[in-house]
Image (cartoon, helix red, strand yellow):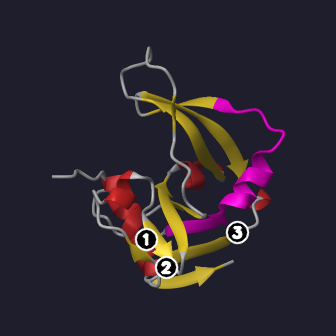
Amino acid sequence: MNSISREERLGRKIVRELWPEIQLEFLGSINDRDGIDGWLHSMKVQIKYDRRIEETGNIWDEHYEKSKGKPWQTWRKCKRNAHLYIFTSGGDLESLSTEGSLAIMVPLEELDNRERDRQMIEIPKEGATSKGYLIAVPDIDSEIKFIEEDNISWL
């Protein structure tokens, strides 16, 4: 049985509400294991849940990771197989309510453009460690949507 974290579950729920046209992959499918969470028309989509967005106004684009509690591990490259990345934040992890959540859809090319000529940084993540880029949301050319009291709005 494939276990899914509450963050992944809430991220998928937020995306289902904001972009109902996205066809989500079945958990544990070959595409899911390859870093593809869904499809928007013919474009591959990856969903990332991150509280950092609501806490700091930044998204974290992870490129390398080490497992929780294993700092001696060599860095593993994160899969970057999607055309579109959807960064989700907010909501309630306990009840999985999407109220107060937001999502930012960013094409891979936009992430690459924002990361060009920047220094990759290392950030601890719940006992694990990852390397990547912290990017301010206002600096990104993206589609941003919010869920407030069951109403959807976007910038």
Q: Which residue extends farthest left? A: 1
For image coordinates 27% across by 53% down, the residue present is 4
Residue extending farthest top: 72
Label 1: state its secondary structure. Answer: helix
Please tell me whether mark 2 sits on a helix, a strand or a loop. helix
Given contact means CB atoms under 8 Å apart, are the residues at marks 3 and 1 in contact?
Answer: no
Which image quadrant for residue 28? Answer: bottom left
Q: Which mark is residue 14?
A: 1
Q: Based on the displayed image, in which of its 4 quarters is residue 143 positioned?
A: bottom right
Q: Position of residue 30 (x, y in %)?
A: 33, 57
Front in this rendered view, residue 33 or 102: 33
Disc 1 vs disc 2: Cβ atoms closer than 8 Å? yes
Label 3 Cα crowd, 10 Å radius (few <14 / some 14-19 / many 20+): some
Total residue callouts:
3
| In the rendered image, the vertical position of residue 76 relative to residue 145, given as above or below | above
Report the span colored magenta: 101-121
Residue 62 visible in the shown view: yes
Q: Earlier in the sequence, mark 2 or mark 3?
A: 2
Q: Which residue is mark 3?
A: 142
**Residue 30 horizontal side relative to residue 91, left or right:** left
Residue closer to the observer: 95 or 10: 10
Mark 1 packing: few (<14 Cα in 10 Å), some, or many (20+)? many
Nearest-to-viewer mark from 3 and 1: 3
Residue hosting label 2:
18
Q: Is residue 8 visible?
A: no
| Quarter holding residue 95 | bottom left
The residue at 69%/77% (across/down) is 155
User: Residue 153: where, in percent of width, then height?
Assistant: 59, 82
Residue 83, percent across and down? 60, 64
Dot 2 surroundings within 10 Å: few (below 14), some, or many (20 or more)? many
Indicate the amino acid at tag 3.
Answer: Ser
